[in-house]
Image: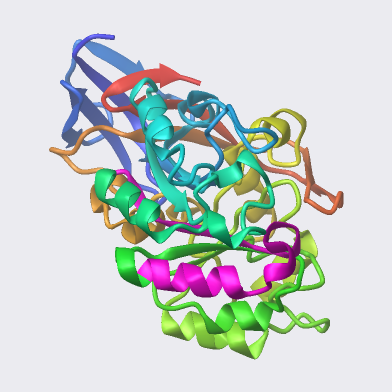
Amino acid sequence: MTSRFVLRNVETTDGNGADIVVENRKIVDIAPPGTGDGEKILDFKNKVYISSGWIDMHVHAFPEFDPYGDDIDEIGYKTGVTTIIDAGSTGADRIHDLGSNSKKSKTNVLAFLNISRIGLKQIDELSDLTWLNKEELIKSVTANKEFIVGLKARISKSVVGPNGVEPLQIARRFSKDSDLPLMVHIGSGPPDINEILDLLVKNDVITHYLNGKANNLFEESGKPLPRLIKAIERGVHLDVGHGNASFSFRTAEHAKEHNIHFNTISTDIYRKNRLHGPVYSMANVLTKFLYLGYPLKEVIDAVTVNAAKWLKRPALGRILAGDVANLTLFSVENESITLIDSEGEERKADQRIVVRGVVINGEYIEC
C-alpha cells in the first residue's frame, strides 16, 4: 500500500459523505466526497459506511488456554475489529505472555487482568481463594500500566465454587488498591445476582447483561430488577458479552421494552464460538441488534464512541485529522440471515452488517 491513499465516497452513520485521506499512518484530511487527493484511490461507489475502528470490549485472545482462547488477529482485524480487550484470559501468572503476543499482532490489544493469578488456565479460577494474590496482582498492574484497563471477576457458580460472593468482595478491595474498575461476569447462581449488584460502583462493567439464565437481571415479568436500576443510576456500565451462553433474544427484548440499553456491544468471542457459532463475528452480533430494532448509529456507537469513552481513549472512537487511522468499513445488505442466540433460539432477519475492510494503524486491509 502506498503511503498516501484515499477512502473515497464513504458515509458515516450520521449520513454524511466524505473522502478520508490517510498518509504515514494518520488521517490527514476529511474532504468532501470525490475531492480527496492521494496516490491510491479506493472508491466505494456503492453505499459503504465508515466508522472509527470497532472496539470489542470482551474477547478471549490467549490461544494456549482451552476452551476460552483464540488468535488475536483471527478475532481482531480480520473480523473488522481494530482494538480488542481481552477479558481476563490471563491473571498475574501469564499477563506478560499476553502482552508479548499482542506486540506480534496487527490488532490493537488491551486487557482486563483476571483477579485469579492463574486466569483461565482452569475455568474454576475463583474456587481456591489462595489464587487471589494481592501482591502479584499489584505487581502485574504496575508493570503493565498502559495495557491493563481493569480487573476481571467471573462471578458465577461454576467459577466460584463454594466461595459465593467472597471473590467479588476481594475483587472490590483489589479494585480500590489498584485504582482500576471491575468487569464482572454474571451467570448462574449462587451467588444471587442482587448480592453482586450491591457491590458494583461507577465505571464497573456488568458483562453478559442480556443472558437468559435464571439468575439474570430481569424479573419473570421482564421488568428490570430494582437493584439493576440503582446500579445504572450509580454509573455501572452494561456490556453485552454475547458468548456461548450469555445472550438471549427474549432477555434482549425485555431490556429494550424497559429502556435498559447497552453501553457497549461485545462478542465474548473465542475459537469455538467463532467457528461454530452462535457468535461468529462482531458483524453477526451487531446484526442482532439491528434486528431488535436499534438504529444503526446507536449500534455502531456501542463499539466505537461508547467503548472509547469507557477506555478513556477518545481518539479510538472518532475520525479526526491528525489521529492514527483506525477505521472500519462496512455495509448494511438487504439479505436474509438466520440469527441464533445462546439459547439456540433462531430469528430471521432481512438485513445484515457486512465488513468491507479496515484501516489498522494506517494500513488498509480488505476483509
Q: Is residue 160 magenta?
A: yes
Residue drawn at point x = 77 percent, y = 31 percent: 276
Number of marks in the image? Answer: 0
Q: Position of residue 335 (x, y in %)?
A: 71, 35
Question: Which quarter of the figure has residue 249?
Answer: bottom right
Q: Is residue 226 above or below residue 238?
A: below
Segment colored magenta: 147-175
User: Which quadrant is home to the N terminus?
Assistant: top left
Residue 182 shows in the view: yes
Residue drawn at point x = 54 percent, y = 30 percent: 79
Tell me if 265 is positioned left or right of 40 in this view. Answer: right
Q: Is residue 211 magenta?
A: no
Q: Position of residue 285 (x, y in %)?
A: 64, 46
Residue 294 shows in the view: no
Q: Is residue 147 above or below residue 78?
A: below
Q: Position of residue 201 (x, y in %)?
A: 43, 78
Q: Is residue 274 above or below residue 236?
A: above
Residue drawn at point x = 40 percent, y = 76 percent: 202
Tell me if 209 is positioned left or right of 277 in this view. Answer: left
